[in-house]
Image: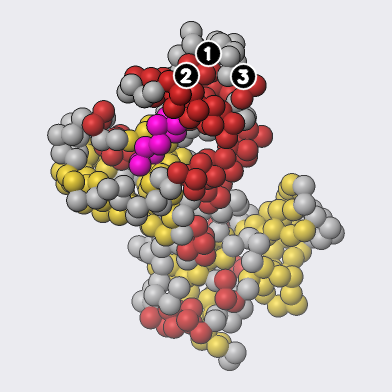
């Protein structure tokens, strides 16, 4: 019942198509993140799953049950919004127990489940406090608990942590994942924050401009992006992407990157992809998947960005701008020339015209 299938799903608002044909299966008990920039269609998708919007085309099924015409209140889903929307005239206890009371659960059950949820979300000491005057962090925790205490088979969360502070987001990432595991819910989580998606989700659906770009585990999305959008969007900093032309060298297949020089020799499957390419390619590698070497890409250091245990080197300028991530004791300084060698097994090639990953990735 708690598996969700989106089949040929389309949503239009007048002449504007917010979601283009989308097929996605969210398995029973899976934590699926819908990830993408503002306006990509992720909240529209969630609103259709919840029953707040009707699809223009296609079907939404919970298990084998078609949700066409089924009201939101009849779908058995829990929903948490970006804005916590709790009852500020009630106490924390009254907020947590609201749904249970409205469905006529016995008083003993209401008390036990509300208090268990409060303990799980570290709200026990605040149970009898009025919600008015509590911090945004606490109010959002109450909102999550109010929905979760109903133990819905499907739990939908629309950017629930975007209005809270960074320290609280870190805590809630752990607590939300623990909540999902405890109740074995199918959870759909809308976010523009890749860190939230990468740390919590079993799989991620990356979206842009109403189009589903790629679906996979966090490691699949990170290590093998399906196209240039995903390569740029996933990672902090994102993947380095340099346009060039495949060339055969005495040592093997490589990519001529113009002023940056010839890339290190490609690994076998990337060499095969380069041979199959009919034009220019984009040579991609993650900033942390590099070494300093005697031979490689020579670039000057244009900026040094120190972030705690890591240092991000900004190298070169314009189309050749590149980033490299090292431990903070690398000793490289502004203006110094760096010879960078991407790890061969970490290189990814994309078609420069279509932006799609080339076969062999």
Residue 149 on the magenta span: yes
State the extent of the magenta-drawn residues as a range: 147-156
* Residue corresponding to mark 3: 126
Picture quarter containing residue 326? Answer: bottom right
Residue 77 on the magenta span: no
Looking at the rendered structure, the secondary structure element under dot 3 is: helix
Distance CA(mark 1)–CA(mark 3): 8 Å
Q: Residue at x 48, y 16 (%)?
A: 94
Marks 1,2: beta carbons within 8 A = yes
- Asked if residue 269 lies left or right of residue 265, the reply is left
- Residue 80: x %, y % from top left: 42, 30
Residue 58 shows in the view: yes
Q: Residue at x 71, y 70 (%)?
A: 291
Q: Quadrant of the C terminus?
A: bottom left
* Residue corresponding to mark 1: 91
Q: Residue at x 43, y 55 (%)?
A: 203
**Foreground residue among 195 and 245:** 195
In the image, residue 119 sits, relative to residue 202, either above or below, namely: above
In the image, residue 200 sits, relative to residue 287, either above or below, namely: above
- Tell me, for residue 95, which label it has, or none: 2
């Amino acid at each position: 019942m708690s598996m969700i299938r989106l089949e040929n799903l389309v949503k239009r608002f007048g002449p504007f198509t917010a979601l283009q044909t989308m097929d996605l299966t969210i398995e029973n008990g899976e934590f699926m993140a819908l990830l993408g920039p503002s306006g990509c269609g992720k909240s529209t998708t969630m609103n259709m799953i919840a029953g707040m919007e009707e699809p223009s085309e296609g079907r939404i099924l919970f298990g084998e049950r078609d949700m066409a015409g089924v009201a939101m209140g009849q779908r058995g889903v829990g929903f948490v919004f970006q804005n916590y929307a709790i009852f500020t005239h009630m106490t924390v206890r009254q907020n947590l127990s609201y749904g249970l009371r409205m469905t006529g659960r016995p008083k003993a059950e209401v008390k036990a489940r509300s208090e268990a949820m409060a303990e799980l979300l570290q709200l026990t000491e605040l149970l009898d406090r009025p919600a008015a005057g509590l911090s945004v962090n606490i109010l959002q925790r109450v909102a999550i608990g109010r929905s979760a205490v109903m133990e819905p088979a499907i739990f939908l969360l629309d950017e629930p942590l975007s209005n809270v502070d960074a320290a609280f987001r870190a805590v809630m990432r752990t607590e939300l994942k623990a909540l999902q595991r405890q109740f074995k819910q199918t959870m759909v989580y809308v976010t523009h924050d890749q860190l939230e998606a990468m740390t919590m989700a079993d799989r991620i659906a990356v979206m842009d401009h109403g189009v589903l770009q790629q679906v996979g585990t966090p490691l699949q999305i990170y290590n093998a992006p399906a196209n240039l959008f995903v390569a740029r969007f996933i990672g902090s900093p994102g993947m380095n992407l340099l346009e060039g032309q495949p060339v055969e060298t005495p040592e093997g297949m490589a990519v001529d990157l113009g002023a940056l020089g010839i890339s290190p020799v490609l690994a076998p499957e990337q060499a095969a992809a380069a041979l199959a390419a009919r034009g220019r390619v984009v040579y991609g590698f993650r900033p942390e998947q590099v070494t300093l070497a005697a031979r490689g890409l020579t670039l000057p250091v244009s900026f040094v960005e120190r972030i705690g245990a890591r240092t991000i080197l900004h190298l070169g300028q314009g189309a050749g701008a590149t980033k490299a991530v090292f431990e903070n004791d690398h000793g490289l300084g502004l203006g110094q020339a760096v010879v960078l060698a991407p790890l061969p097994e970490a290189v990814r090639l994309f078609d420069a015209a279509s932006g799609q990953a080339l076969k062999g990735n």
